[in-house]
Amino acid sequence: MANWIPLWVHKLSSPPNFYRFAGTLRPWALVLALLLGAVALYGGLVLAPADYQQGDAYRIIFIHVPCAWMGLFIYGVMAVASFISLVWRIKLAEVVAMESAPIGAAFTFITLVTGSLWGKPMWGTWWTWDARLTSELVLLFLYLGVIGLYHSFEDRRQGARAAAFLAIIGIINVPIVHFSVNWWNTLHQGSTVRILGPSKMSSEMLWPLLTMMVATKFYYIASLFGRVRTDLLSMESGKDWVRQIAAQESQR
Amino acid sequence: MTATPDAAPILLEARALSYYRQDEPVFGPLDFSVRAGEVALIEGDNGSGKTTLLRILAGLLHVDDGELHWRGRPWRREEHLGDTVFLGHHLGLKSDLSARENLQVAAGLYGTRCGRHVDGALADVGLAGYEDEPVRRLSAGQKKRAALARLLLLPATLWLLDEPYANLDRTGIDLVNRLLAEHSSSGGAVLVTSHGAVSFLHGEPKRVRMHA
Amino acid sequence: MSHAPLAPACAAVLRRDLTLAWRRRGDIAMPVLYALIVTTLFPFALGPEDALLQRIAGGAVLVTMLLAMLLALDAMFRSDIEDGSLEQLMLSPQPLALMMGMKILAHWITTALPLIIIAPLLAGMLHLPAAVMPVLIYALLLATPLLSLLGAVLVALTAGSRRSGMLLALMLLPLCVPVVIFAAGAVAAAQQGLPWLAPIAWLGAALAMALVLAPLACAAALRIALDA
């Protein structure tokens, strides 16, 4: 019987258990993130050859592309956690969803900034209404809406549930926005340049990119776990397990 | 108020009911039952969770812990709605509509008791002649009476009244007591909150204490 | 014990909201006035050149409409929450989604319909060609109910929060991007003499979907925001 999986998940979702679990895993994830990030940066900025068309400017993709992936990935995680929190009213899922939002917003913001930095030498302008950049901008607004709604409630759990609902509406909206922005972009023939074709990527460029992708995942885990731990402590501040931890900390 | 025979069916029963706000217990665990024909007084100080309890029983708040039974079956919002009428701090009257229009909306949503009409209900609470006045221009006591008229009009078995005596004069208090007596004698049940020890209820009502 | 039938309940809610709006006619005029003012400002900001105004007319009118509707959106449930009539509505033995649908319909009639009626005037002020006018009206007839429906869900979500109109704008923006794109796209296509049916059809499809889903989502959002 595969009963142990739901049982394990159920045990883990209790705040004190998750607090301990996240505390053990967090340093490892952080070390891995820094290590892999350094390797990927070295591979991307030093080892990989310059692009025959774009020169060295293309190297920003080693930051830009993994961040863009993370922006979407974290939104997905947030939506799944939101769904779980609304259906089963699990407190941990609420916390994971709400603490994912600022991290995802940060990744999306980095994507926008690096995209515009790359756009200056390539397109000769800081900002262009390219379909992908526009979709990223809308994604950032979705994140900001979720964060704003969460903080506008007096009761944090109520705010988390309302924001979770918004996150789910948002994930239905993401493909619609992407489709409509693409349609809009073909209607108004703009300055769009297609450069990042995956077929052109040589393996020397590909491995740092993939390594960076793994590094950002680990960073997300480390950052999320840290935030969730803090949040659990403040939400459960009246409970016995938090008192025990506080007592242990003050003895040191 | 006459003592109700124990044979009357239990309408509402709570077992170990408790409620938390941000993990702080608001009240509970509470055990009580309300039979048909009973008037129960919920007693407790300010902040003891009387209003919260009524909002839970009305179906406006989610039950955190414990069991709630309605007519012998586990409480479900869908079965419960319409059989209960809730009168809270906010009276639920639109100030730009007249008392009559307000009651007509309520009647449209909830239906009406057999043989009851909007104007008759308004006359019964002493608002004859004020039917077409916008609620905005009524005094606080008259607004309360307009809200009480809803109790007469709607076909509900259980009344949940949060501080029904507030803002009422002597005759208003008598009116509430008369409504409660009529409702309980016709097989309905009432839960009334009243803060502190102040209770205008006649006789010896059943008491539900928020603090054990 | 007989429960109230559905049709009179719907009629009661619709009639109540329309009566209330009529008793406060001044509030209905506000979005219209706002749209008029914003449209007047465009020629001052961009210069009175016919060709330029003509080019931006469709988009400018649409964005103005959107902002004017946003202005009125915030008030959708506010007074109902403050005087407790929303509680009475939620406790009534009627499907909440349908009641919300009625409220949204009343809101659309009282805010969007007057805006659509003055839309030809606004478009005329910006020299939109008369031939394109019907397309603009079709686009508005499909886009404004969509905005009302989407907006209602978001307003319901903010129902239990400290009120903030800015937050509503932030939340609505991502949702209304596709609506604006297709509505303005249809007008732009018509202006260039291109076929404009496709974006209108997309809007219609989105409206059909929102008509079914948005009242349900609105009811669910309200229950979450007021914790029922």
Image (cartoon, rainbow, N blue to C red):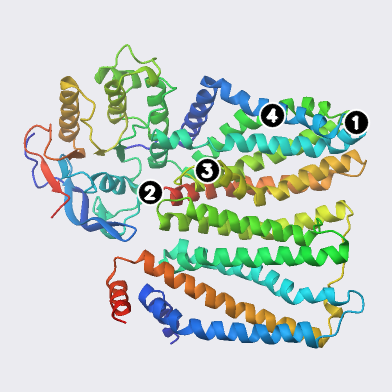
The disc placed on residue C115 is: 4
Q: Is residue B112 above or below residue B61?
A: above
- Asked which secondary structure carries label 2, the reply is helix
Q: Nearer the viewer, residue C212 or A129?
A: A129
Residue C196 sits in which quadrant?
top right
To which residue does mark 1 refer? C49
Visible residue check, residue A79: no
Question: Contact, CB < 8 Å: mark 4 with mark 1?
Answer: no
Select label 4 or label 3 by which is in front.
3
Q: Quadrant of the N terminus of chain C?
A: top left
Query: Looking at the picture, which amino acid does disc 1 mark?
Result: Glu
Q: Is residue B119 above or below residue A73?
A: above
The mark nearer the N terminus, 4 or 1, is 1
- Asked which secondary structure carries label 3, the reply is loop
The subunit carrying tag 4 is C
Distance, label 1 to label 3, CA atoms, is 38 Å
Q: Residue C185's spot in the image, x, y percent?
A: 82, 45
Distance, label 2 to label 4, CA atoms, is 39 Å
- Asked which secondary structure carries label 4, the reply is helix
Q: Residue at x 29, y 20 (%)?
A: B142
The subunit carrying tag 3 is C
The mark nearer the N terminus, 1 or 3, is 1
The disc placed on residue C164 is: 3
To which residue does mark 2 refer? B78
Distance, label 4 to label 3, CA atoms, is 24 Å
Labels 1 and 3 positioned on one and the same chain: yes
Q: Residue B5's spot in the image, x, y percent?
A: 8, 43
Q: Residue at x 86, y 33 (%)?
A: C53
Distance, label 4 to label 1, CA atoms, is 25 Å
